[in-house]
Image (spheres, rainbow, N blue to C red):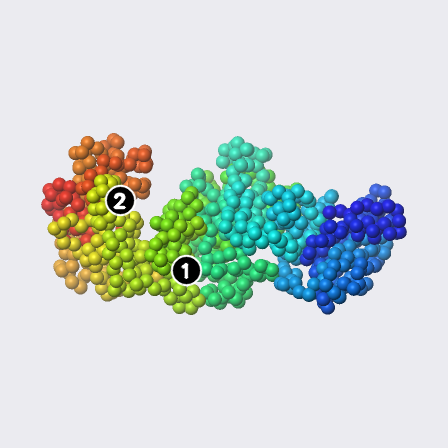
């Protein structure tokens, strides 16, 4: 707001400034109020000539003071010079002011503090609120939100008019924020009025009736997140950036050129600064450019930290904005300062070299910096290869990408000038540059959602590499975390379009929320915040010292059997790795004439290992089946899938030396294992697949048994006037083999072409075949049980001849 002009009077500067800025002065917290003196109101040397802009007073400082305490206001003159200033309080019983601008609270109330320039006669005022106590005021006063001298609040000082425009006021002034959320009675998500420069994010911006009820945020992508809670919604209203995947896509579409063609309609797009909300919510709000169509890439969603530290104010003090480093130190060792947070690397990521530099000990911050440097290399190579000119990047100068006139790869001060901005943009280059900026302008991005930033950088490099004659080497770099922590996997992202993980799936696919609910109540619950990979609290009760596992007393299997007496770790693993269908559920479906494929689900390792003790496989009447495979010298799941030794990848290969040193001395990989070399001729000595080789790997003994079953299923289907093929990657796996070539071609593996000529015998056989395919470690978990299921299923379909050469364990 600018002050009202007044007439030619000795008091014109004083009254004009006071009356004109009164409304602006109502913003609590910190003043940055300006007033002008009209021609005729200024003394010699004060400016204000006919062809010169009038003098302006800029008043800064706190606008709240407690009784008995003092705050100091500062004033400066723009477009003129004042040798001194006169300060006046409108009510000295409430607040006094001395000749240095120091205001002292005398009693609860409000007083206007007015200042007039001795030479310019320009004047302005600010309303000072005197109170007995302002909660958290000191913390706020030292924060970036209160710094009225910062670029975030001073950027528009040189503009004419001198005000924060409506498109910026939402986050760069308290009046604009209040306007945007509709706390002034105006339309929500719109700022109608420009705001005075220098007004900060003050008390009532966040503490008003509307802000207290905020619960949703509209992001630049058009996505609205709901049920956030007021604290998080306040923060994300501004800390979300101003651009998105959708912004970049729209500009590229409007330009209408090919990926590697330049267009004058393409310009660098800036996500803006401190877009932590966009980083945190990742693929859900599409803050970065996501290469779905180009690369088939899938992205993490919201980063789920541990309970209590998964919101903005859980990690940041809401008033000082400082990171609660002491709380970080509860889990992360050697953390004393904010800078130390850059060194954090949790166990789950210690086996992944995201930037491929060979350093698995550096913090995630430095992994991101490594990828960022690689992307800069790719951008530079691409620009030169495409004849666009040399380009360099500056973190501090807008618009960040400039012509690298000396070709040294870095922007000098002279090069980082707006007139030297890089302007030869292609769609491919624009996407990469945008993602580089996304990774650069959220300094806490490594903590907010480091995996999302890694994916954006990795994919940007990969896309550039598709056309680079000298690709950036990503051969040693990794994009995704191992199994349980891969937030971009199908196991984590399957429910994104549903916007919730269903109650039937949340036990294993929503991190700590779903599993803990299931363990407490024995049923699932719908979880709206989709899994981003498992969080520490999924399995661990104690997150500060010894990481004690949650107690699980038994495993419940889909057969209705509850297995007890196993160790706690195995019970915890088996709660999810138990399958979802069994002989019991298939028999029930057949009895009700509900014929169709029923999927055992994925990685049912605990069910296979326990064999007949869990009865998840379809066990045929009159046959005997193997029970729990008692592996020695260690039987629990975590002996082979050692969480500590594998750094939580749970991949046997990561601790395979344990196997080779103890027993399997000649094996080069887990799949090489045949049996126990200390009992040759006793354990798994048979020729199970009838090929005459009793020394081949167990995985190779099992494969022909599965192939024979699938062939018998196809014969059975053909005898029934249909055809069948199997695809391991497309649901529901069994499809009609339209061309009868025995395999599912891409055009056949779609849901509309699913196999539907099911008989009870085919249902049973398909169940057992699927178990053999969806437990890739089944040969080790319980070879005997799987071999028995496969041979018996083939025989049941009428393939006695097909199994005549097999040896049933």
Q: Tell me what residue is drawn at x 50 percent, y 33 percent.
A: 258
- Badge 1: few (under 14), some or many (20 or more) residues near its Cα, within 10 Å? many
**Tag 1 and tag 2, C-beta contact below 8 Å:** no
Q: Mark 1: which secondary structure?
A: helix
Query: Does 110 sit above or below residue 4?
Result: below
Q: Residue at x 60, y 44 (%)?
A: 188
Instruction: Give the mark nearer the N terminus: 1 vs 2.
Output: 1
User: Looking at the image, is 175 positioned above or below residue 339?
Assistant: above
Q: Which residue is mark 1?
A: 536
Identify the residue shown where x is 36% and y is 59%: 520
Is 480 situated left or right of 610 in this image?
right
Q: Is residue 202 visible?
A: yes
Residue 660 visible somewhere in the drawing:
no
Q: Secondary structure at mark 2?
A: loop
> Which of the numbered marks, if any, corresponds to residue 274?
none
Q: Nearer the viewer, residue 69 or 474?
A: 69
Q: 352 and 235: which one is in front?
A: 235
Q: Position of residue 83 (x, y in %)?
A: 84, 58
Residue 598's label in the rendered image is: 2
Q: Position of residue 447 (x, y in %)?
A: 50, 56
**Are there few (<14), some (14-19), or many (20+) residues within 10 Å of tag 2?**
some
Picture coordinates of residue 338, whole percent (x, y): 55, 62
Q: Is residue 79 left or right of residue 576?
A: right
Give the Cα distance between marks 1 and 2.
32 Å
- Left or right of residue 656, residue 546 in this image: right
Mark 1 or mark 2, which is nearer to you?
2
Quadrant in which residue 713 is drawn = top left
Residue at x 78%, y 62% (from the top left corner): 101
| Count of numbered circles in the view | 2
């Amino acid at each position: 707001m600018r002050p009202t002009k007044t007439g030619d009077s000795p008091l014109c500067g004083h009254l004009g400034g006071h009356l004109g800025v009164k409304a602006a002065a109502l913003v609590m917290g910190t003043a940055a109020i300006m007033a002008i003196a009209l021609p005729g109101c200024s003394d010699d040397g004060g400016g204000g000539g006919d062809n010169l802009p009038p003098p302006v007073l800029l008043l800064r400082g706190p606008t709240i003071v407690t009784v008995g305490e003092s705050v100091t206001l500062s004033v400066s003159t723009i477009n003129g010079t004042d040798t001194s200033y006169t300060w006046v309080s409108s009510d000295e019983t409430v607040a006094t002011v001395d000749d240095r601008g120091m205001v002292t609270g005398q009693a609860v109330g409000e007083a206007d503090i007015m200042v007039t320039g001795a030479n310019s006669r320009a004047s302005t005022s600010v309303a000072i609120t005197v109170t007995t106590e302002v909660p958290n005021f000191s913390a706020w006063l030292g924060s970036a939100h209160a710094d009225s001298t910062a670029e975030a609040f001073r950027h528009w000082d040189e503009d004419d008019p001198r005000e924060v425009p409506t498109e910026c006021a939402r986050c760069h002034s308290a009046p604009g924020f209040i306007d945007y959320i509709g706390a002034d009675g105006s339309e929500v998500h719109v700022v109608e009025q420009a705001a005075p420069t220098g007004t900060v994010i003050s008390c009532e911006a966040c503490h008003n009736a509307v802000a207290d009820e905020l619960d949703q945020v509209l992001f630049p992508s058009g996505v609205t997140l709901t049920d956030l809670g007021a604290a998080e919604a306040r923060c994300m209203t501004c800390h979300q950036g101003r651009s998105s995947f959708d912004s970049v896509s729209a500009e590229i579409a409007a330009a209408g050129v090919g990926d590697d063609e330049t267009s004058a309609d393409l310009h660098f797009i800036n996500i803006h600064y401190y877009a932590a909300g966009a980083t945190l919510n990742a693929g859900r709000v599409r803050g970065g450019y996501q290469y779905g169509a180009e690369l088939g890439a899938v992205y993490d969603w919201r980063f789920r930290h541990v309970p209590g530290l998964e919101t903005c104010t859980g990690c940041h003090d809401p008033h000082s904005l400082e990171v609660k480093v002491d709380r970080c130190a509860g889990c992360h060792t050697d953390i004393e300062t904010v800078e130390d947070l850059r060194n954090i690397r949790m166990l789950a990521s210690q086996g992944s070299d995201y930037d491929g530099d060979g350093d698995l000990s550096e913090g995630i911050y430095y992994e991101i910096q490594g990828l960022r440097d690689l992307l800069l290399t790719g951008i530079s190579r691409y620009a030169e290869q495409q004849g666009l000119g040399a380009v360099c990047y500056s973190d501090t100068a807008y618009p960040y990408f400039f012509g690298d006139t000396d070709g040294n790869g870095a922007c000098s001060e002279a090069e980082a000038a707006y007139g030297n901005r890089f302007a030869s943009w292609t769609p491919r280059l624009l996407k990469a540059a945008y993602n580089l900026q996304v990774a650069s302008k959220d300094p806490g991005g490594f903590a907010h959602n480091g995996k999302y930033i890694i994916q954006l950088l990795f994919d940007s490099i990969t896309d550039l590499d598709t056309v680079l004659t000298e690709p950036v080497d990503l051969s040693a770099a990794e994009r995704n975390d191992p199994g349980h922590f891969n937030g971009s996997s199908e196991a984590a992202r399957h429910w994104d379009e549903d916007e919730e993980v269903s109650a039937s799936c949340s036990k294993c696919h929503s991190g700590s929320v779903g599993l803990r609910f299931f363990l407490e109540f024995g049923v699932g619950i719908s979880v709206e915040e989709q899994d981003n990979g498992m969080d520490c609290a999924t399995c661990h009760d104690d997150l500060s010292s010894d990481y004690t596992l949650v107690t699980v007393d038994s495993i419940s299997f889909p057969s209705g059997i509850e297995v007890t007496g196993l160790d706690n770790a195995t019970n915890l693993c088996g709660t999810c790795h138990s399958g979802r269908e069994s002989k019991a559920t298939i028999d029930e479906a057949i009895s009700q004439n509900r014929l169709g494929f029923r999927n055992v689900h994925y990685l049912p390792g605990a069910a296979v290992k326990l064999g007949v003790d869990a009865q998840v496989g379809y066990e045929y009447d009159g046959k005997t089946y193997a029970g729990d495979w008692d592996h020695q010298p260690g039987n629990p799941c975590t002996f082979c899938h050692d969480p500590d030794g594998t750094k939580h990848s749970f991949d046997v290969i990561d601790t395979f030396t344990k196997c080779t040193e103890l027993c399997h001395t000649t094996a080069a990989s887990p799949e090489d294992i045949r049996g126990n070399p200390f009992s040759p001729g006793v354990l798994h000595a048979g020729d199970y697949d009838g090929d005459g080789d009793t020394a081949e790997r167990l995985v190779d003994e099992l494969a022909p048994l599965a192939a024979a079953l699938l062939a018998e299923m196809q014969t059975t289907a053909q005898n029934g006037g249909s055809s069948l093929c199997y695809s391991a990657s497309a649901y529901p796996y069994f499809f009609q083999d339209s061309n009868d070539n025995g395999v599912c071609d891409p055009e056949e593996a779609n849901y509309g072409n699913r196999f539907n000529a099911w008989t009870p015998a085919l249902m049973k056989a398909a169940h057992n075949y699927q178990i053999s395919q969806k437990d890739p470690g089944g040969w080790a978990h319980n070879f005997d049980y799987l071999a028995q299921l496969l041979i018996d299923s083939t025989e049941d379909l009428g393939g006695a001849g097909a199994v005549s050469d097999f040896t049933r364990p």
